[in-house]
Amino acid sequence: MRVLQIISALIVLALSQMLHADDTKHGVVYHLAEESQAIRAFHNATNHLAADKHVQITFVALSGGLQALVADAADEKGRLYAPFIDELSMAGVKFKACKNTMRAMNLNLDDLNFGVEEVPSGVMEIARLQNEEGFAYIRP
């Protein structure tokens, strides 16, 4: 009788874990290193959020990709980046800018879109998110 109770408890525990597995947040870091990839990356993130409501997306912009986070910046077709960033931010996406690149481009946080966070090093932040927080890595 005791064995049946233990087996029943294990089955209930396993079913409970299966039912709540989809409620777990998981992270993905999008490495934005080239401005020319920004619109595609923003579309990818929008599609990602639509397909997976439990994902936490963080963009880390460095090198040429930082230009996409500059306020009033637009791509070669004249499409402003800010509306994409605003929409994604409202959906919980985080945007982080490399301080080393900002310094090299003579930019400060006031030059970037609202809500962008500064990190000391873009590559360090990508590595930290992967190693310490278990984020998956995407480079569009």
Image (cartoon, rainbow, N blue to C red):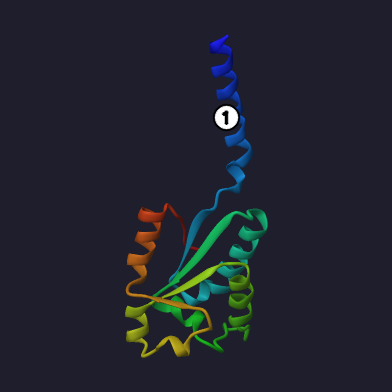
Question: In the image, residue 63 lies at what x, y percent?
Answer: 39, 76
Image quadrant where one finds the N terminus: top right
Label 1 crowd (10 A; few <14 / some 14-19 / many >=20): few
Up the image or down, 84 lies above or below 74; here it is above
Residue at the extreme front: 2
How many marks on residues? Answer: 1
Residue drawn at (41%, 55%), measured in percent from left and top?
Answer: 133
Residue drawn at (56%, 89%), measured in percent from left and top?
Answer: 72
Side of 131 where 48 appears, left or right: right
Question: In the image, residue 2 lies at what x, y percent?
Answer: 54, 12
Up the image or down, 78 lies above or below 16; here it is below
Side of 129 where 85 appears, left or right: right
Side of 92 where 99 appears, left or right: left
Residue at the extreme top: 1
Residue drawn at (62%, 76%), measured in percent from left and top?
Answer: 84
User: Circle 1 — which element?
Assistant: helix
Question: In the image, residue 25 lies at what x, y percent?
Answer: 54, 52
Up the image or down, 123 lies above or below 113; here it is above
Camera-nearest residue between 81 and 121: 121
Q: Report which quarter residue 17 is drawn in.
A: top right
The residue at which mark 1 appears reads as 14
Up the image or down, 109 lies above or below 34; here it is below
Question: In the image, residue 99 lies at what x, y percent?
Answer: 35, 79
Q: Report which quarter residue 78 is drawn in.
A: bottom right
Q: Report which quarter residue 81 is drawn in.
A: bottom right
Camera-nearest residue between 139 and 18: 18
Residue drawn at (37%, 70%), measured in percent from left and top?
Answer: 122
Q: Amino acid at mark 1?
A: Ala
